[in-house]
Amino acid sequence: MTDQSHAEAAAHAGEDHPSNRVYLGVAGILAVLTALEVMVFYVEALSPVLVPILMVMMIGKFALVVMYFMHLKDDPGILTGLFTGALTVATAIVIAMMALYERFVI
């Protein structure tokens, strides 16, 4: 590639890049979700459904991190499948271990 084509590629790569405001907004949402996770853990009435609530929040936070901070939302679908598959396997392992040790309620 010539220097001009490198410069054009760099110019086009920066066009779709989110602004700092977007990153700060995502960081704020992640902070709120983390605070909610801590709050849910200490609410006694939610203990029967604690694990499903925390797992849903975990998946939401995972999705936000990989979409924005790892730029997965702009990548090809194969990479999305790779991360989604890994999340599915990890979640299945956690659920299997909890079932094995009968620890669904903390």
Image (tube, helix red, strand yellow):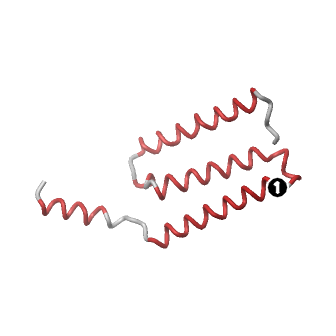
In percent of width and height, residue 64 lies at 55, 56
In percent of width and height, residue 94 lies at 67, 35
**Horizontal relation, residue 6 to residue 61: left or right:** left
Q: Is residue 48 above or below residue 93?
A: below
Write the residue at 18% across / 59% down. Answer: 6
In percent of width and height, residue 8 lies at 20, 64
Write the residue at 74% across / 45% down. Answer: 52
Residue placed furthest toward the bottom: 21
Name the quadrant of the C terminus. Answer: top right
22 vs 102, nearest the viewer = 102
Write the residue at 68% across / 49% down. Answer: 56
Residue placed furthest toward the right: 45
Total labels drawn: 1
Write the residue at 57% across / 50% down. Answer: 62
Residue type at numbered disc 1: Tyr
**Horizontal relation, residue 48 to residue 62: left or right:** right
Q: Label 1, on which residue?
A: 42
As helix, strand or loop, the secondary structure at mark 1 comes to helix
